[in-house]
Image: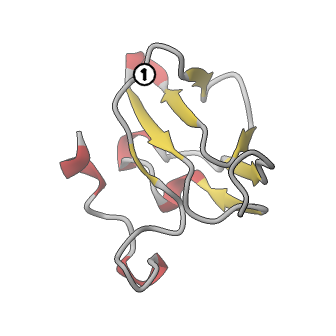
Amino acid sequence: MASSFVGVAAADTFRNGQSFYGQPAGEAPSARVIDLSTTKFANITYGETVVFRGAGGQKFAWTFNGLDSRSWDLAQFAPASLAGKEYRVYVSRNPLTRR
């Protein structure tokens, strides 16, 4: 699954090469599923893994462990087949993961 995310912009990375947005994830059974066809935005907590599902059953999983207290356009990190409409992801702080 990670090979489809090679398109994450290199300019949007930390010095260690990690993406500001987080990273691709495997589908964890406990991950929340968000249906892109029925919502316009998603509220995510830093560190959370989410499965985004689009039309035709297409889906991808993402762990939001890059920057928090930000909002991102889904098209910045989603596969092109799922990033066709404008969709915002709001990543809030998680007090359990703060230093």
Q: Residue at x 23, y 39 (%)?
A: 1
Residue 90 at x, y percent in the picture: 75, 51
Label 1 crowd bin: few (<14), some (14–19), many (20+), radius 10 Å = few
| Identity, as a three-letter code, of the amino acid under mark 1 | Ala
Residue 17 to residue 64: above or below? below
Residue 40 to residue 6: above or below? above
Label 1 belongs to which residue?
Answer: 28
Residue 95 at x, y percent in the picture: 80, 49
94 and 39: which is toward the camera: 94
Q: Residue at x 74, y 45 (%)?
A: 96
Outermost residue, left side: 3
Which quadrant: the C terminus? bottom right
9 and 92: which is toward the camera: 92
99 and 38: which is toward the camera: 99
In the figure, is residue 73 to the left or right of 55?
A: right
Residue 78 at x, y percent in the picture: 44, 49
In the figure, is residue 86 to the left or right of 69?
A: left
- Coloring scheme of the render? secondary structure
